Image (cartoon, rainbow, N blue to C red):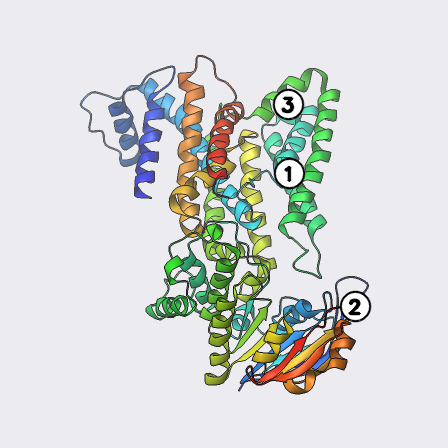
Amino acid sequence: MVLFSLFLVMMILTSLSMGYIQIPLIDIVSIITEKIFGFSFSSGGINETFSTVIFDVRLPRILTCAAVGAALAVSGVLFQGILLNPLADPYTLGVSAGAAFGASFAILLNLGMALVSVPLFAFTGASITLFVVIFLSYSSKNPMAGLSSNNLILSGIIVAAILSAGISFLKFVANEQVSVIIFWLMGSFASKTWADFSIILIFLFSGTIISMFYARDLNLISLGAKSATSLGVDLKKITLILLVTGSMLAAICVSVSGIIGFVGLLIPHMIRLVSGPDNRKLIPLSMLAGAILLLLADTITRAVLPHEIPIGVLTALTGGPVFCWIFKKNRMKY
Amino acid sequence: MTSIILENISFSYGAKPTIKQISCQFGSGNFYSILGPNGSGKTTLLDLISGFLKPDIGQIKIDGTDILTLSKNQLAKKIALVSQDYAINFPYLVKDVVLMGRHPFIPRFSQPSHKDYDITESVMENCGIAHLKDKKINELSGGEKQRCVFARALCQDTPILLLDEAFSNMDIRHTLQMLNIVKRAVKEKNRVVISVFHDLNIASAWSDAVLMLKNGKIKTFGETLDVFTHETIQDVFNVESIVEFNAHVNAKQIYYPSI
């Protein structure tokens, strides 16, 4: 845990230094300490350009990216736990499709001018989708059938299928706007602001606290509905709380940065191999690992590759094969 | 003294009722068996008693309190359940799964106490799974998993234990070992055990009283020796049988003549 945190801090510093303008690490440290503590330990004066680049451009982007990675990973842990399926991810319930539909709609209506609208529409789309999915799978009578993993997954797939047809239709109607929609869907951290970061941070913070609060109950849920209930877990209540928490985390991520796949699936899976399935360890570790991995990916597209490619594409292109490898390796055990 | 009283319980999953107006009473120091053909409502009846399902009509009282007024945690300190479904998808270690039985007694965010660990250790020893404790639960065989889940329920150390075909995948040695543990708890600690069986002979040998269900109704409920007769078995299961007292088992045994 300490190791992961140290690694994350190092990763943030390194990626701050990388980019079109290379900034030496020592300058970064002195700029940041100057800003926070009000004194500078470097002898020379601080380069104004460096300071602007760091505080207005790179730091908000880097922190947003780390927070999104963390939120997606926590959300992934929650979904895998509730759906009793190590292969579930934050988008299993169609939250991403809902957000994408909302965003496409906003772009089509040209609401993009007022900067907030696209994320706002995406978030609304995601939330509505979640409640439709929960409504579809909810049954007041039988706790086994209501909100069971199969019901949730099925409703998610149905709703997502309808929405993706809807997105196709919007793209068809959109004419010249279609490239904006497509680009948005692929995800990017370009030109993220402190405002984006603070919104994500609030969600990440509250989401993680809620998840940690119910982490032990989530462990028991993996024993199956009846066993968990007989051990004193209020199954319906906790499933609902964690489902909403996980989906809100995913929704805010999608609204801020578009659809970034595989982080929520891969990270909990990889960490579980190291830490074991206990959610009390899995949640914080996945959070840190998610931040590190997504930041690494973003730094690669931003500073290493000659052209910035959409981060959603990069994570899927690299995460996919890694997942295949882990999956194949572990197939033998099941 | 523990008592479970069912008052005029009815329950249906859909339009067709599964449990029809059942009233009965279970008291401490007794091992009860529930027998009946497939789909007769045995598991549903256990689910109702454990509070997993809520009856449409009627009340279930434990020591005079309606179970719907108890919190899930209070209920978990009174009733433990070994369900038919013992599949676990995640690679938890056996000792962690067994320790989960102490969940109702461990406050949120605190570590298990020495007592919790001691109980877990001794239960694993008794159930013969101590050698498996550092193995992953999803890599065990069906019978081994079932023993782990059984051990978890024993760790809950509750006055009432419900067993839903809890022995279905165990070999005969482990079945007898588990039955012995449970029977001793019934007699020495005055516990209540209610178990669903398919094997009439084991039910007859181990139970103090037997309840037979058919189509969601009680066909017969009474002392084991009185319940097992050729006529009742014919009536409930629709099979021909020979029922006679066996001195080795000190109980009635049932034989099925070949057709």
Camera-near label (2 vs 3) is: 2
- The residue at which mark 1 appears reads as A94
Foreground of the two, A107 or B110: B110
Q: Amino acid at mark 1?
A: Gly
Foreground of the two, A36 or A10: A10
Disc 3 crowd rating (10 Å Cα; few below 14, some 14-19, many 20+) is many
Which residue occupies the extreme top position in the image?
A306
Foreground of the two, A107 or B164: B164
The chain holding disc 2 is B
Which part of the image, by quadrant, shows the N terminus of chain A? top left
- The residue at which mark 3 appears reads as A181
Q: Is residue B17 above or below residue A158?
A: below
Q: Amino acid at mark 2?
A: Pro
Q: Secondary structure at mark 3?
A: helix
**Cα separation between marks 3 and 1:** 18 Å
**Residue B216 shows up from this direction:** no
Location of residue A8 (image quadrant): top left
Q: Is residue B94 above or below residue A243?
A: below
